Image (spheres, rainbow, N blue to C red):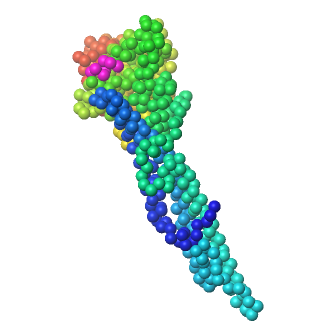
Amino acid sequence: MTAVPLPVVAGWDVPLLRGAVGTLDLVAERLLPWRYRLDDLGRRIGDAECWSGPAGTAAAAALVELSSAASGVTGSLTSSLQDLQGLGAAAAEAQELAERARALAVSAGVALDDGGRVVGVPLLHPLMSPDQAADVAAAARAAASAQAAAEDASAAAARAGECARSAAEPLGVLGVPGPVAFAELVARLPDAPAPSVPVGGVPEAVAGWWSALTAGEQRAVITAEPGAVGALDGLPGWARDEANRLGLAAALQHLPPGSAGWSTASVVQAQLAAVEAAGAVAQLLQFDPVADLVALSVGDVDTAGAVGVLVPGIETTPADDLGGLVGDARDVAAAAAAAAPGLAVATVAWLGYRTPGWRTAWSSGAADRGGPALDRALDGLAASRATAARTTGSPALPRTTVLAHSYGTVVTGRAVQAPGRLAADAVVLLGSPGVPAGRADDLEVDEVHGAWTPVDVVSQMRRYGPTPFDPSFGDVGLPTEPTQGHTQYYDRDRPTLAAIGQVVAGTRPW
């Protein structure tokens, strides 16, 4: 590689170079949140009822292309920045050595040509005294040494520059006189296959994997593996919703009408339509007709400031009871909105575990399986929101409340016992037959609220551990009426519902 001549090195504006590298660093840093905003806008345009048809489709596709281009630019800049920063350091070193070479040349009484070579080196003469001969030889050696060092440094700077150039070359923007047209930029981006979906990853790692994908890659993996994406805790609600709706459509098309899976799919489709007809966002966060698992939100879990997760008890199935559970979720969301006007609320009807029947309700087996699933679902919501907040500046973590009823409180207790801290701010225990995790102080949240009534015998059983019925449990009681039965805590004409809304909104005194 040809070394850079010393006069050229001496003329480099190193502060300007370092400033430009710093600016590029800021550009790379700001491109990522900008890309996520593009992704979000593309989804909104693609889903918006106010703009449909070819124009809306083309606009959404253009935003996806622009996001992919931004991702490509970000990757190239990121890989180039280390080399560019090394270039700045090498340029400064080369400049320093060039000046030293010139100073030594002057002190030795020699000159440097444009190529950085020493000229006019005095020759030894037989008539020189030993001291004169030694001085001449030392000066020549010093100049030659400085020249070699400067050439080495300038060559290193040239190599760093070539590395930076190589990192940016895939974009095809080098050596052009002006800005590159968007179409040219997109045309240079390679077609990437759908990424592989991670299996068994912790929600935090899943959220990081997802956020690193381009919008095009995200769309591709949703289309290629909707079942895997829909079941993946740590992904944003919109992605799981899109994937699970593909699975829902496939179930309705391919499962035999009248079968258990088809019946579940039909109920899910009806509830999604009902929530949307009422003017709320509906997200299908989980859909597994084979395992009979469903989670459906009333509201957008990606943007809500408060999220309530309803965990039901025994004999609750998607086919028979999803409508009632979604209705309860709707009423809780309305109560929370009334408690804090203007607050964005999302509530989740969570049937992410197989509830036991009457014959198996005395066993903790269903809770042993459901508890870790609930813990993971809460971790996934928190991881997705935390990653979005870091990368896009979107709202930070929502206030999250677990609303557990009956055997659902046993599931919640098992979730508390899962590794790691429960990703929630508050727990509400309604008609609990006992909490295996212990008393209120053991539930890993800042707030524990409970409700029971004299006619609710389940709340007095203590089958699985202490309950809010125990005076020493340590919860803050919610208002009830003496005639309130075990299934009436969410009733609109009972005082408990309004208090639950206050807990979800974070306005109830604690």
Nearest to the observer: residue 117 or residue 22: 117
Is 277 in the magenta? Answer: yes
The reply to whether residue 306 is in sight is: no
Nearest to the observer: residue 491 or residue 347: 347
The rendered magenta stretch, by its main secondary structure, is classed as helix
Left or right: residue 379 compared with residue 457: right
Left or right: residue 277 compared with residue 83: left
Left or right: residue 109 compared with residue 129: left
Residue 449 appears at what percent x and percent y? 34, 26
Counting every numbered tag in the picture gives: 0
Residue 400 appears at what percent x and percent y? 37, 31
Is 208 in the magenta? Answer: no
The outermost residue toward the right is: 126
Q: Residue at x 27, y 21 (%)?
A: 278
Residue 506 appears at what percent x and percent y? 30, 32
Q: Is residue 208 above or below residue 362?
A: below
Residue span colored magenta: 272-278
The reply to whether residue 227 is in sight is: yes
| Quadrant (top left/top right/bottom left/bottom right) for the N terminus | bottom right
| Quadrant (top left/top right/bottom left/bottom right) for the C terminus | top left
Q: Residue at x 37, y 40 (%)?
A: 37
Nearest to the observer: residue 329 or residue 506: 329
Q: Residue at x 46, y 65 (%)?
A: 15
Query: Image quarter for residue 306?
Result: top left
Query: Image quarter for residue 237?
Result: top left
Q: Residue at x 50, y 55 (%)?
A: 175
Residue 150 appears at what percent x and percent y? 61, 70
